[in-house]
Amino acid sequence: MRNKSADAHQSNLRLSNFLCFAIYSTANAVTRAYQPRLAALGLTYPQYLVMVVLWEEENQTVKAIGDKLSLDSGTLTPLLKRLEAAGLITRRRDTVDERQVLIGLTEQGRSMRERAEAVPVAMGQAFGCTMDEAQAMRSELIAMRDNLVASIDEAK
């Protein structure tokens, strides 16, 4: 008679062996750790990411923002509407190509950047690693993501 417990320990279907679950649960923990830090700004994590993209460069198209954040327009548009209602961004049609919507920052959105500078510092402390360790993990995760995206394209 086989030992079921020993078989479960060796199984490929053991949750504790799943790299994907470690990534998934870590992503959830990261989002939960951001929540109280972003509450002071009145932003959710996805809204914060949009603001970071716009602080890097204003007047981007919805498509460009979506591409940078890996978000489709169906997800991004309601998020942008909430940021606009909060007085942080503007949405306007491109005068050259009216099919494009340009997203810019309001003065309130620009001034929020200074208060947001504390968020990455606090999160760096929460991660509990050095900046070099964080950058190394980031590089590994980006390589993993790129490999996964390539495998998706190959499977099509």
Image: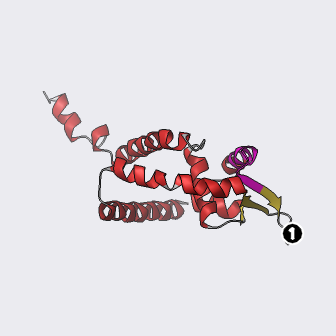
Q: Amino acid at mark 1?
A: Thr
- Check the image and report above or below for 5 versus 114: above
Q: How many marks?
A: 1
Residue at image position (46%, 64%) is 146
Between 17 and 7, the one nearer to me in the picture: 17
Magenta residue check for 81:
yes
- Check the image and report above or below for 40 versus 72: above
Asked where in the image residue 6 lies, by quadrant, the reply is top left
Residue 132 shown left or right of residue 28 in the figure: left
Q: Quadrant of the N terminus?
A: top left
- Identify residue for label 1: 95
Q: Quadrant of the C terminus?
A: bottom right
Q: Which residues are magenta?
A: 78-90
> Where residue 76 sits in the image (x, y, percent)?
67, 50
Magenta residue check for 126:
no
> Where residue 81 sits in the image (x, y, percent)?
74, 46
Which residue is situated farthest in the bottom direction here? 96
- Check the image and report above or below for 128 versus 101: above
